[in-house]
Image (cartoon, grey):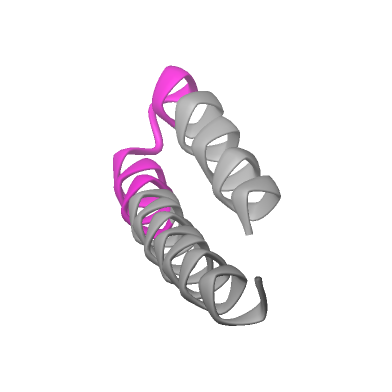
């Protein structure tokens, strides 16, 4: 997921440099969304890992 966020961020940067404001804004929005989603999923897995590790040991 972070890979796709990075790809969209690069697309947004390139589109912004070339003057395509609409495409750059949309790609930046998608990149932000994917990054936040990846952080949320990471946090959920960390919490699950900690709670399950306590039950196993």
Left or right of 29: which side holds 8?
A: right
Q: Is residue 17 above or below residue 26?
A: above
Residue 12's spot in the image, x, y percent?
46, 37
Displayed quadrant of residue 39 = bottom left
Residue at x 49% of width, y 23% of height: 18
Left or right of 12: which side holds 52?
A: right
Residue 32's spot in the image, x, y percent?
34, 50
Q: Check residue 18 for magenta coloring.
A: yes
In the foreground, 12 or 18: 12
Residue at x 49% of width, y 60% of height: 46
Q: Is residue 24 above or below residue 57?
A: above
Residue 29's spot in the image, x, y percent?
31, 54
The residue range painted magenta reads 16-30
Q: Is residue 24 above or below residue 1?
A: above
Residue 49's spot in the image, x, y percent?
57, 68
* Quarter of the image with the N terminus in it: bottom right
In the foreground, 15 or 40: 40
* Quarter of the image with the C terminus in it: bottom right
- Which secondary structure class fits the magenta region best? helix
Displayed quadrant of residue 14 = top right
In the foreground, 25 or 53: 53
């Amino acid at each position: 997921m972070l890979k796709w966020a990075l790809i969209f961020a690069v697309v947004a940067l390139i589109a912004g440099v070339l003057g395509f404001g609409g495409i750059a804004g949309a790609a930046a929005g998608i990149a932000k969304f994917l990054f936040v989603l990846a952080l949320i999923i990471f946090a959920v897995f960390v919490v699950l890992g900690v709670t399950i590790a306590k039950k196993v040991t």
